[in-house]
Amino acid sequence: MKLLEGKIALITGASRGIGHGIAVKFAEQGANVAFTYLSSVEKGQELERELQAFGVKAKGYKSDAADFKAAEELVNAVIADFGTIDVLVNNAGITRDTLLMRMSEQQWDEVINANLKSVFNLTKAVQKPMLKQRKGSIINMSSVVGIKGNAGQSNYAASKAGIIGFTKSVALELGSRNIRSNAIAPGFIETEMTAALDAKVVEGWRDSIPLKRGGTPDDVANATIFLASDMSAYITGQVINVCGGMLT
C-alpha cells in the first residue's frame, strides 16, 4: 500500500523546486494532488500531466497564496473538485535578499506577505473542512534560516521564524480535533535557483555541511510524505530540520 493512498493534498507553489518535488513524490505515493502556481500556466499544465501519469487525480490552480480572498476561493474550488482536503503543504515563498541598511519597505512587505501571511491565509481557509472531518495534516515550509538567522536575509529569516511560531500555535489549537501542524526547515537545497550561483560558493557551502552535499527536493519531499502520512499520527507542533546536519 502506498503511504498517501487516497489522500487529497493541496500544495502551494508547486511549479518548480521543492514544491515540484513534493507534488511528484505525493502522486507517486498515491495522493490526489491539487497545487498552485503563480505565473506560468504552461508549467502548471505540464505538472498536471506529470502527476496524472501516476494514475491519480491532479489539478493546478493559478492563485496567489498571499491574497486572503484568493486563498479562500482556492480552498472552495479544491473542495468542489476533490471533495475535501486531507493535507495542506504551505510551500509558496520568495526571497528579496539584501542587507537591512539597503532593504526597502517593499522588499520587507513582499517577503512577509508571500512567506508568512500566505501560511495564515491557507491554514485559516482549510481549517473549516478539516474541523468538519476531524482530521488533517498541515505542513509548513520554514527554513534553517528561520532558526539561526542569516546576514542579508532579515526579511526571509523573520518570515520563516514566524512560520515556526504559527505552526506550534496551530498545533495547540487544533490538536484536540486530530488536526496536526508541523514544520519542515530545509537547509541548503540544490534547485534550478542554486544552479545559477558561482560554483566555488556552492562548493564552500557543501564543504561546511556534515553530510558534504547539498540537499535535493526529494530529501525535503520525503520528510513531507512522512508528516502527511499516518506514520506520523502522533507528531504535531514539531520542526524537522532537513539540512544534512548543518544545524548540529
Image (tube, rainbow, N blue to C red):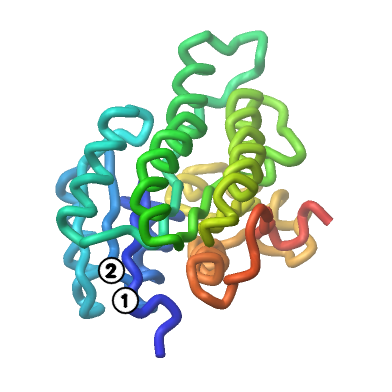
User: Horizontal and vertical percent for residue 98?
Assistant: 59, 21
Extreme residue in the right direction: 248
Q: Judge from the rendering whether residue 57 lies leftward or rightward of residue 191; answer left or right.
A: left
- Residue 235 occupies which quadrant of the picture? bottom right
Q: Rounded to the nearest whole Å, what is the CA distance between mark 1 and mark 2?
A: 7 Å
Question: Decide: marks 1, 2 in contact (CB < 8 A)?
Answer: yes
**Disc 2 target residue:** 32
- Classify 10 Å Cα crowding around label 1: few (below 14), some (14-19), many (20 and above): some
- Reply above or below: 235 against 14: below
Quadrant in which residue 102 is drawn: top right
Residue drawn 48% across and 59% down?
137
Q: At x 42% / y 53%, what residue is drawn?
A: 131
Image: 93 above or below 66: below
Percent x, y of residue 29? 39, 78
Image vertical order of residue 105 relative to residue 165, above or below: above
Which amino acid type is shown beneath numbered disc 1?
Answer: Gly
What residue is shown with label 1? Answer: 6
Q: Nearer the viewer, residue 212 or 228?
A: 228
Which callout, 1 or 2, points to the residue nearer the camera?
1
Q: Is residue 188 visible?
A: no
